[in-house]
Image (tube, rainbow, N blue to C red):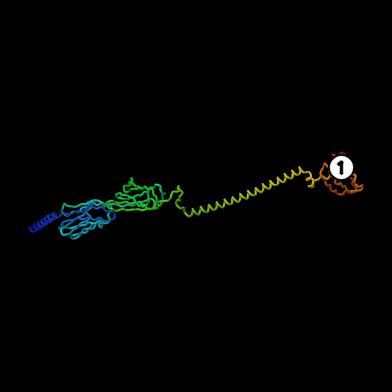
Amino acid sequence: MEGSWRDVLAVLVILAELTASGSSYQIIEGPQNVTVLQGSEARFNCTVTHGWKLIMWTLNEVVVLSLTSQEPIITNDRFISESYNRTDSFISEMIILDVQPSDSGVVRCSLQNSNVFGSAFLSVQVMGTLNIPSNNLIVTEGEPCSVTCSALGWTPLPDISWEVEVPVSHSSYYSFPDPGNFTSIFSVLDLTPLGSGTLTCVAELKDLQDSKSLTVNLTVVQSLSEGKEGPALPTWAIILLAVAFSLLLILIIALIIIFCCCWDCRREKEESTYHNEIRKSTTVKTYREDPETRLKSGKENYGYSSDEARVTQIASLPPKSGEVSLPEQRSSNLPYQELNNHRPSPATHPRVSFDIASPQKVRNVTLV
């Protein structure tokens, strides 16, 4: 019985010594604040005096790593430990792998049976994406234009700037956050380009001195209002225009040929009609104005003769002649007429006789 009391007393003495000795250990330097990018590593150091028994690491008041003088006690594979011995101190380093935004918070280093601890803050930043509506921008030379760059999913919001690698007469930009999304921001570049080149949108996280950029091509075309060529037409459009122009040219030539032929035909018809009218007019005029010519043309009246000619003819007719012959007489009042012989008539027909009643009367006799 007495021996057992001695054992209990020895244990209490040992615990008292451990408590007293543990309280004498100090943390020389605690961890420092760390800001890291999502997916990277975060490292924290805790420097203590020699003779320590147990070091504990907590994140947001949850123990994630413990370290004894013999070996570390790892409870999560994302939290590992490194140790460094110095002549007058010991350094314990905790490494957090694949840091996520949920890891942001208070990191604390403490010693067993000690109220002394060191703490720091872990900040995790997220680098999102950059977007410009088109990778190849086409603008008009000398005309103002705007280019928008959007940064989506950034924590915190980055600072956006532009690198303008084109000749310009003016350029400026401004940024504004997305009212509906606290992780997005927009930047608008206003410029008046004078030539082609590149534009680069740069988003930077200041705390990390890390950035992301996006470059697009800017193609400047000359203004069509100044009589300069615009963007080149595609090949199919050029071929279509060439075929249409050729067909139009052929149609115009065909119409010209048809018009010329119709004009020549109409002109020839008009000239022929005109000449016919002239000939008719000349013939009628000659017929009316020149009786002698009218007689010579063969349109004589064979039954007409003057009174003197009829008297002479009756006196000179032979008594048994079957034919009537009229001698040629020239009248002082009528033009010269040549009388042709009439066809012989049968002997049974009576003889033709002329009865001169008056020198002014003309008889036409028809022989049956």
Residue ranking furthest to the front: 332
Disc 1 element = helix
Residue 32 placement (x, y as % from top left): 22, 53
Q: Nearer the viewer, residue 86 or 258?
A: 258
Residue 85 placement (x, y as % from top left): 18, 60
User: Please, what is the three-letter code of the amino acid marked with disc 1?
Assistant: Glu
Q: How many callouts does the rendering have?
A: 1
Hey, which quadrant is residue 356 in on the image? top right
Residue ranking furthest to the left: 2
Q: Quadrant of the N terminus?
A: bottom left
Please say if 282 is above or below 13.
above
Question: Which residue corresponds to the image point at 53% horizontal and 52% vertical from the top-left?
Answer: 245
Residue 227 placement (x, y as % from top left): 46, 49
Q: Nearer the viewer, residue 267 or 14?
A: 267
Q: Left or right: where does residue 135 sit relative to residue 324?
A: left
Other-residue count near label 1 (Cα within 10 Å), few / some / many at <14 / 14–19 / ≥20:
few
Q: Left or right: where does residue 71 sit relative to residue 212?
A: left
Residue ranking furthest to the bottom: 70
Q: Nearer the viewer, residue 126 or 24?
A: 126
Residue 332 placement (x, y as % from top left): 83, 42
Which residue in the protein does label 1 denote?
308
